[in-house]
Image: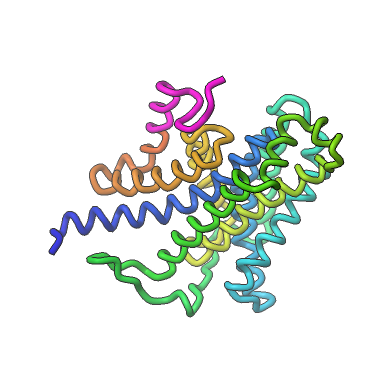
Amino acid sequence: MLSVPLVVLLGQVVLGLINGAFYAVLSLGLAIIFGMLNVINFAHGAFYMLGAFVCWLLLTHVGLGYWPALVVVPLVVGAVGVVVERVFLSRLAGIDHLYGLLFTFGLALALEGGFIFVFGAAGNPYPVPDALRGIVRLGPLILPLYRFWVITASIIVCLAVWLLIEKTRLGALLRAATENPRLVTAFGVNVPLLVTLTYGACVGLAGFAGVLAAPIYQVSPTMGSNLIIIVFAVVVIGGLGSIGGSIVTGLALGVIEGLTKVFYPAGSTIVIFLVMVLVLMLRPAGLFGRET
């Protein structure tokens, strides 16, 4: 039999993995957008919020349940991302990164303000799907089944995206297009379309995370802004543009945050930023980033 303190400790590790799962999925999309498109996408949290709201609206106004929403919502949010990249961000390509950051920051504020104006600042509950109600036992631990699903689904999606980028011809083509777009264009590849679809897919990942978050957190216009700063810290710690680093760092920092709540609860809100400061002091490129 495990002692009570050890059970509590393991419970916080598992709860930390839940937060880490969201950090990993969101930071993965951010890392791809920055590493391959050279865009600092401050609107990523707003797209996460948009995914949760689309999921909630589909249920309350259309009657579309959770499982179809897992497929439909990323497509809808990804389509919004495609429009944003094609109409706005493509015009900022090739100039200072600051312009892209300012545009996406303004877009995030506009989306958040618009949703507050229409739906109010209060959160809206989203029910856990019937198939994922109940508990799952992990040795001495009892975990809600839905939270176990969130951890599992997030890890599977992150690994699938990493394999797609690192181990397939499509991923190699995308990496080549960001390194030398003129050469890839000479081989008949439509590089602007590839960039647009990549941005849309990464934004779709944020929408997917929003669907996963809807039954856990209140669906509110500020849910993205509350998370995006932490996700940016995760990306910086893992290394800007490092896909694998974002996944590993997101999960690890979620665990560190959970353990901090056991030993020093008051420090749990700043521990990730303290880790970021230490990493930047010792390795400015991040844990998995490449030194230039």
Depth check, front residue: 275 or 50: 275
206 in magenta: no
Residue drawn 54% across the image and 60% down it: 122
Residue 101 shows up from this direction: yes
Q: Is residue 123 left or right of residue 34?
A: left
Q: Is residue 183 left or right of residue 12?
A: right
Q: Is residue 206 left or right of residue 199?
A: left
Residue 239 rendering spot, x and y as whole percentages: 51, 32
Depth check, front residue: 47 or 146: 146
Q: Please, is residue 63 above or below residue 111 in the view? A: below
Q: Is residue 273 left or right of residue 240?
A: left
Residue 281 rendering spot, x and y as whole percentages: 42, 21
Residue 59 rendering spot, x and y as whole percentages: 62, 74
Q: Quadrant of residue 63?
A: bottom right
**Number of numbered callouts drawn:** 0
Q: Quadrant of the C terminus?
A: top right
The scheme the figure's colours follow is rainbow
Depth check, front residue: 55 or 222: 55
Q: Please, is residue 30 above or below residue 81 in the view? A: above
Q: Quadrant of residue 51?
A: bottom right
Q: Quadrant of the N terminus?
A: bottom left
Residue 207 rendering spot, x and y as whole percentages: 62, 57
- Give the extent of the magenta segment: 274-292
Residue drawn 41% across the image and 56% down it: 18
Residue drawn 30% across the image and 42% down it: 266
Residue 106 shows up from this direction: no
